[in-house]
Image (tube, rainbow, N blue to C red):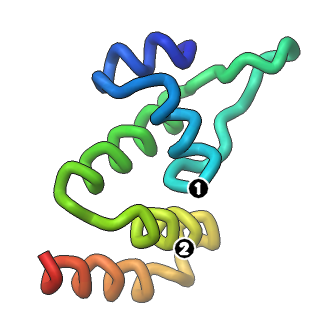
Amino acid sequence: MTIKEVSDKFDISQDTLRYYERVGMIPPVNRTSGGIRDYQENDLAWVELAVCMRSAGLPVETIIEYVRLTQEGNSTFSARLRLLENQKEVL
């Protein structure tokens, strides 16, 4: 999917999608040979998670940390769980 299609699907701006990727709220999106973002199903799941977490009131820094931990693999499961539990208490 193109950035426009994803923007329309989640009702967020294209600039917001670029921001999410730039700061690490979603992992880097693959690009075509021409440099255009090409969102796949996995990317859409990350966008959906970021949108959901933001609408729930989670800080950007927390989402970035969650994504970083997730990309490190299953060994960070307990750290991710603690992060979410701490945010639940804050919210």
The crowding category of the residue bearing disc 2, from other C-alpha atoms within 10 Å (few below 14, some 14 to 19, many at least 20), is: some
Q: Amino acid at mark 1?
A: Gly
Whole-percent x and y of residue 42? 51, 37
Compute the Cα span from label 2 to label 1: 11 Å
Query: Residue 25, relative to residue 63: is it above or below?
Result: above
Q: Is residue 37 left or right of residue 62?
A: right
**Residue 78, numbered circle:** none
Residue at the spot 41% in from the left edge and 62% down from the top edge: 60
Residue under the image location 21 percent in, 61 percent down: 57
Q: The N terminus is located in which quarter?
A: top right
The image quarter containing residue 5 is: top left
Which residue corresponds to the image point at 45% horizontal and 69% vertical from the top-left?
61
Residue 48's spot in the image, x, y percent? Answer: 34, 39
Mark 2: which amino acid? Leu
Query: To which residue does mark 2 refer?
Result: 69
Q: Height in image: 46 above or below 8?
A: below
Residue 76, placed above or below residue 13: below
Q: Is label 1 in a helix, a strand or a loop? A: loop
Q: Nearer the viewer, residue 76 or 30?
A: 30
Q: Position of residue 67 (x, y in %)?
A: 51, 63
Q: Quadrant of the C terminus?
A: bottom left
- What label sits on residue 24 in the rendered view? 1
Which residue is at a point 81% across and 20% down the rendered structure image?
35
Q: Residues within 10 Å of mark 1 (few under 14, many from 20)?
A: some
Say which quarter of the image contains residue 37. top right
